[in-house]
Image: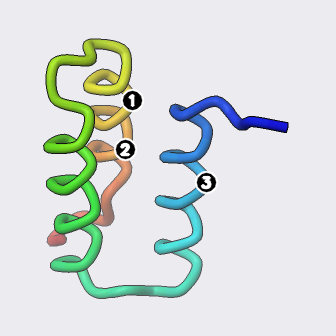
């Protein structure tokens, strides 16, 4: 069963939050994901959503 790529991003991001990774690691995940999905408007919107969920000060 294949998961929706947007859902994979959301779940991975949540896993990183749950593990309390550093703000730099969260940003690195977002940056690498943006690079991987460049040109995909739907994924860009998901990544914007995740970026807005980053803890303040991150």
Which of 28/55 is in front?
A: 28
Q: Position of residue 37 (x, y in %)?
A: 26, 33
| Quarter of the image that includes the N terminus | top right
Question: Where is 32 relative to 35, above or below?
Answer: below
The Cα–Cα distance between marks 2 and 1, rounded to whole angstroms, is: 6 Å
Residue at the right extreme of this rendering = 1
Residue drawn at x 19%, y 56% is 32
Question: Where is 24 relative to 38, above or below?
Answer: below
Residue drawn at x 19%, y 41% is 34
Residue drawn at x 23%, y 43% is 36
Report helix, strand or loop for mark 2: helix
Q: Position of residue 25 (x, y in %)?
A: 25, 78
Residue tagged 2: 50
| Residue 2 occupies quadrant | top right
Left or right for 17, reference 41: right
Mark 3: give few (<14), some (14-19) or many (20+) Cα within 10 Å.
few
Q: Which mark is residue 11?
A: 3
């Amino acid at each position: 069963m294949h998961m929706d790529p947007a859902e994979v991003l959301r779940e991975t991001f949540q896993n990183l939050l749950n593990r309390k990774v550093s703000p730099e690691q969260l940003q690195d995940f977002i940056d690498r994901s943006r690079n991987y999905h460049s040109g995909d408007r739907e994924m860009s919107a998901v990544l914007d959503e995740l970026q807005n969920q980053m803890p303040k000060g991150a």
